[in-house]
Image (spheres, helix red, strand yellow):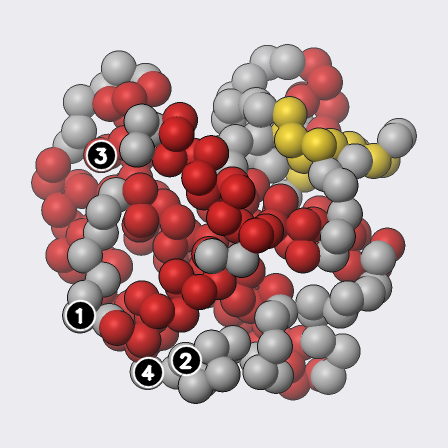
Amino acid sequence: MIVYGSSLSPYVRKTLAFGAEKGLVLENKVSVPGSPDPEFLACSPFRKIPGFRDGDFQISDSSAIITYLEALHPEPNLIPPDPKNRARAVWFEEFADTIVVAAAGPLFFNRIVGPRFMGATCDEAVAAKAENETIPPLLDYLEGLIPTSGFLLEDRLTLADIAVASPFANLGHLNFDLSRWPRAKAYAAAILARPSFAALVAKEARLLGG
Ligand SMILES: N[C@@H](CCC(=O)N[C@@H](CS)C(=O)NCC(=O)O)C(=O)O
C-alpha cells in the first residue's frame, strides 16, 4: 500500500500514523501538492495530498483512506463502534482537518513552506493573525476537554487523538508557544511521542534543518 505525499502535511501525517498504529506497512512516496506525476494523479485527481494506492484500488483524501484501512484491518480498532463515540471521533477528525488546519495552515505556509520551498516571502500580517487571533480560541476549546487519561475518547488511542495531534507537529516545527495551554501541550506531546508519529516528526525536523 502506497501513500503519496509529504508528512509535513497534517493529512498525510495523520494517514501514515494511523496505518502505523494498525501495524500496517505503508510505503510513503513523496509527492508535492499539484504534482503532475501520472502515478500520483491517478490516485488524486485534484492533486491534493495524500493520494493512496492498494494494488488497483486508488483513492484520495485522508479520511477516505483511513476509512478503507479501518474496514480492511478492523483490529486494533481505532474508530469506536459505539455510535456516540464514533460520531465524536468523526467530529474530532473534522475539527482537526477543517478547523485547526484551516487556522494553522496560513501560519505554516507563510513561515515555513512558502519561504523554504517556494521562494515566497512570508506575509507577516497573515501569519500574525493566525498566531494571535485564529489559533488561540481553538486551543482554548481543546484545553477544556482533554480527559486525565490523555486520550479524547474511551481512555484509549483512537482516530480522534491521531487527527487532533497531527497538526500540533506543524505547530512544533513553528516553535509555537503553547505555554498558555498546558493540558493541550502535554496531551499533544504524548501522542506525538508515540513511535507512529515520532519517526515522521523527526524526519520532518531533519528536512527543515531542525
Ligand atoms: N480533505 C483532504 C485535504 C487534503 C489537502 O488539502 N491537502 C493539502 C496539503 S496539506 C493539499 O494538497 N493542498 C493543495 C491544494 O489544495 O491544491 C484530506 O483530508 O486529505
Residue type at numbered disc 1? Arg
Q: CA distance from mark 4 to mark 3?
A: 28 Å
Within-10-Å neighbours for mark 4: few <14, some 14–19, many 20+: few
Disc on the earlier residue, 1 or 3: 3
C-alpha gap between disc 1 and disc 3? 21 Å
Q: Do labels 3 and 2 touch, CB within 8 Å? A: no
> On the picture, is 53 further left or further right than 17?
right
The numbered mark, 4 or 3, whose residue comes first in the sequence reads: 3
Q: Quadrant of the C terminus?
A: top left
Q: Residue at x 67, y 50 (%)?
A: 20
**Pointer 1 local density, CA inside 10 Å: few below 14, some 14–19, many at least 20:** few
Please state which amino acid type lies under the numbered disc 3: Arg
Q: 44 or 66: which is nearer to us?
A: 66
- On the image, numbered disc 2 is attached to which residue? 146
Tell me the residue that label 1 is attached to: 180
Along the horizontal axis of the image, is 110 left or right of 51? left
Query: Percent x, y for residue 179?
Result: 18, 66
Query: Residue 57, relative to residue 162: is it above or below?
Result: above
Give the mark nearest the N terminus, 1 or 2: 2
